[in-house]
Amino acid sequence: MEKKKLSADEKHKRRIALREEKKLALKQLKEKEEKLQYKKDEKYMGQALKLAGKAAALGEVPIGCLIVYDDKVIARGYNRRITDQSTLSHAEIIAIKKASKKLGDWRLEHCTMYVTLEPCQMCAGAIVQARIPRCVIGCMNPKAGCAGSIINILDMKEFNHRVKITRGILEKECSYLLKDFFGRLRKVNKEAKTSTES
Ligand SMILES: [Zn+2]
């Protein structure tokens, strides 16, 4: 009787140990996947930053965007509002247009968007309309962002599509690019003002 009780106890202990082992293995797998995803996110955000640099070279506010499908970049865009004299020429809209053309579908399901700055109301609306499932954001835009700063158009329960958001990928680099751009712009404006005054 004593022996049987002990073996049942042992069985119970073993079951618990196995369960714990399985839990730990799953946790480790999840952490590994998250790490891999984070590395991938950083890689693509780095490419979006380079696109933002192209906008800066044109004298545009440096914002870059790309869309990834099946682990491949299928569309790129950067802010060209002044160059095109069009309010529609935001990085995200340009990339969405190109991605839809490439896939031959207005729905961008299974795609991930990477954008260096939190999307505005127009772009956030387009991301929802295009049914993009995931959006990775570099830095936030407290004054105009519509993915959590002022409003979160990407994730509203009232809409038929909600976007998964990842924030803060290469955040420092993304915000530095903007700060540097606006700093230089202020300097140029100040110099222009001084030269007209003198
Ligand atoms: Zn926008």
Image (cartoon, rainbow, N blue to C red):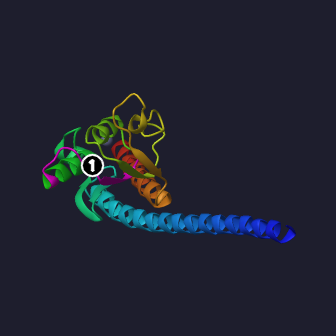
x 28%, y 47%: residue: 92
Where is residue 161? Give x, y as percent: 34, 37
Q: Is residue 186 left or right of residue 91?
A: right
Residue nearest the observer in this picture, 184 or 178 = 178
Q: Is residue 135 magenta?
A: no
Image position of 113 with respect to 86: above or below:
below
Spot occupied by residue 30 in the image (x, y as percentages of width and height): 52, 63
Q: Residue furthest right?
A: 2
Whether ligand 1 has any atom under 8 Å from the Cβ at mark 1 is answered as no
Please state the horizontal and vertical placement of residue 96, each as a whole percent of the image. Answer: 23, 48
Which residue is identified by label 1?
Answer: 109
How many numbered discs, if any? 1
Residue reaching furthest to the top: 158
- The relative height of residue 138 versus residue 15 in the rendered view (above or below) is above
The amino acid on which the numbered mark 1 sits, given as a three-letter code, is Glu
Return the residue nearer the eye: 120 or 165.
165
Identity of the residue drawn at 36% across and 61% down: 49
Magenta segment boundaries in residue numbering = 103-118
Residue 24, picture quadrant: bottom right
Q: Which image quarter has ligand 1? A: top left
Q: Quadrant of the C terminus?
A: top left
Magenta residue check for 111: yes
Answer above or below: position of 25 versus 112. Answer: below
Q: Secondary structure at mark 1?
A: loop
Q: Residue at x 45, y 51 (%)?
A: 166
Q: Position of residue 95 (x, y in %)?
A: 23, 51
Q: How many residues crowd around disc 1 within 10 Å: few (fewer than 14), some, or many (20 or more)?
A: few
